[in-house]
Image (cartoon, rainbow, N blue to C red):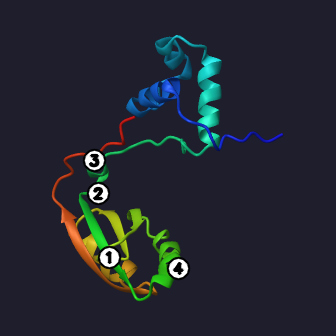
Amino acid sequence: MEKNYSNYDLDNLDVQILSILMEDASIPYTEIAKKLIVSGGTIHVRMKKMEELGIIHGSNLIINPQKVGFDITAFLGIYLEKGSQYSDAVAQLKNIKEVVELHYCTGQYSMFAKIICRDTTHLRKVLNEDIQGLKGIQRTETIISLEESIKRQITL
């Protein structure tokens, strides 16, 4: 029998578990259990439930792009020829590894992307050859980031 958690609300224990993991995703469940004075099984069950609900989507290793030779971060406002081309544009942009975030948005742009490149030559290649030539993209506007001052998840 499939469980239905559609009305599931996070309780204080769930929030505490998530807060600990958001600070350090590599911490073992047994350590979380010790901190919160519950069993390791409780942490495991809660995590499984939150994964099934889509509250948690795996865990990621975060690298510093500059330390591995990617020195340019840029934001790209993308104008589509027609709004109906959004899904096709997303599918095409997924194939460009330098596109690390993509948002469908209101306002001036149809889409807003974050791209990371090695240098300005690489950025020019990605813009001119990879992105601007895609079917459905009318034009783009690029903003180069000089420094990332804040990067964090929401606080629970």
Location of residue 118 (image quadrant): bottom left
The mark nearer the N terminus, 1 or 3, is: 3
For marks 1 and 2 on the same chain, the one whose residue lies earlier in the sequence: 2
Q: Residue at x 65, y 27 (%)?
A: 45
Q: Is residue 142 above or below residue 64?
A: below
- Quarter of the image for the N terminus: give it: top right
Crowding around mark 2 (Cα neighbors within 10 Å: few <14, some 14 to 19, many 20+) is some
Asked whether residue 150 appears in the rendered view, the answer is yes
Q: Badge 4 is on which residue? A: 88
Viewer-nearest of labels 3 and 4? 4
User: From mark 3 to mark 4, how far is it between C-alphas?
Assistant: 33 Å
Secondary structure at badge 3 equals: helix
Report the residue marked by disc 1: 109
Find the distance from the CA under tag 4 to the CA under tag 2. 28 Å
| Location of residue 20 (image quadrant) | top left
Nearer mark to the viewer, of 1 and 3? 1
* Badge 4 amino acid: Asp
Q: Which amino acid does the dot numbered 1 rest on? A: Tyr
Q: Disc 1 versus disc 3: distance between alpha carbons?
A: 31 Å
The amino acid pointed to by label 2 is: Phe
Residue hosting label 3: 67
Give the image location of residue 68, x and y in percent. Answer: 31, 50
Question: Label 2's element?
Answer: loop
**What whole-number distance in Å separates the C-alpha atoms at marks 2 and 3?**
7 Å
Q: What kind of residue is marked 3?
A: Lys
Q: Dot 2 corresponds to which residue? A: 70
